[in-house]
Image: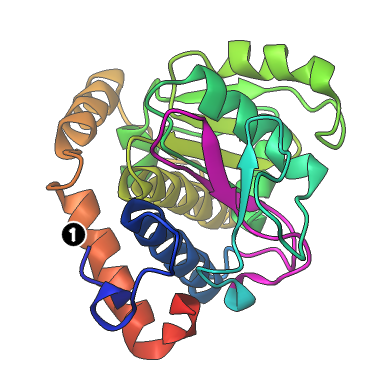
Amino acid sequence: MTIALRYTTTPAGMAEAEWEARLELAATYRIFAMLGWDEMIFNHISLRLPGETPTYLMNPFGLMYEEVTASSLIKVDLDGNLVEDSPYSANPAGFLFHGAIHRTVPDAHCVMHTHTTAGSAVACMDSGLSPDNFYAAQLHDAVAYHEFEGITVNEGEVPRMLEALGDKHLLILRNHGLLAHGRTTAEAFYRLWALSRACEIQLAAQSTGQPLRRVSEAAARSSSRAAADFLEPGRGPEQMMFDALLRKVDRLDPGYAQ
């Protein structure tokens, strides 16, 4: 990683891998804020830490995304319990799904959840995501749906959410918002970005009142295969795009590295 590691040092007593993860995640929160993907103090991005004891990092409840720093991120176990002292706590509505996905999906290194206007609007549509735009076609058969059961604080909902997610990396939470996970932060981000763009374009096209030009099943399948082949953890275009955004944060908002 080429971001703030060049001008920060790993805090005493902390493994370098954890500090790198903290810097990357804090920078990601700033990226979300720049893109308008934040939701005041709500919603989450979580990042699983390496090590024998399963733990992950997430945002402290009460901070806006533009306030999150590497050192203020909280470390929790898979049940959302703090494993290190912090003046902050976790939002119970956040760690329930995040912890469950980190626990049960081996390649879910990073989990992201948003309530963007376009994503939440498509989640409220009975027909869900239409395949009829450039980004949506790339997500053909790649998006799962989970029915709305209220604010996500009921542990009984977790098995149903995991069953709905299945082997997919993208989940539209009906009447709620979007969720993505990936083997890397860059991969999760790229998937969520593609889904968010698909939702935005769908709403813009539908707002014209004109019928949508249909994408053929063959074209959608071809697009989704090409998009899946596109991702290459650590080396693919999704990493290059994410690295470009990290450089932008480094230029414009380096306070995340505190």
Between 203 and 99, the one lying in front of the other is 99
Quarter in which the N terminus is drawn: bottom left
In the figure, 19 relative to 149: above or below? below
Question: Quarter of the image holding residue 10?
Answer: bottom left
* Residue 104 percent coordinates (x, y): 52, 17
Q: Kindly give the residue lying farthest to the front in the view shown.
A: 13
Q: Residue at x 28, y 83 (%)?
A: 7
Question: Quarter of the image holding residue 97?
Answer: top right
Q: Residue at x 45, y 46 (%)?
A: 192
Q: Is residue 173 visible?
A: no
In the figure, 246 relative to 128: above or below? below
Q: Residue at x 33, y 31 (%)?
A: 215
Q: Residue at x 32, y 58 (%)?
A: 16
Q: Kindly give the residue lying farthest to the bottom in the view shown.
A: 252
* Residue 161 percent coordinates (x, y): 67, 19
* Residue 2 percent coordinates (x, y): 20, 70
Left or right placement of residue 88 versus residue 71 in this view: right
Residue 72 covered by magenta stretch: no
Q: How many marks?
A: 1
In the figure, 61 relative to 127: above or below? below
Question: Quarter of the image holding residue 227?
Answer: top left
Q: Label 1 crowding class (10 Å Cα cut-off): few <14, some 14-19, many 20+?
A: few
Tell me the magenta residue range. 38-65
Left or right placement of residue 176 versus residue 256 in this view: right
Q: Provide the residue designation for mark 1.
A: 240
Specify the principal SS of the magenta part: loop
Between 135 and 244, the one lying in front of the other is 244
Element assignment for label 1: helix
The amino acid beneath tag 1 is Met
* Residue 169 percent coordinates (x, y): 43, 28
Q: Is residue 14 visible?
A: yes
Between 29 and 3, the one lying in front of the other is 3
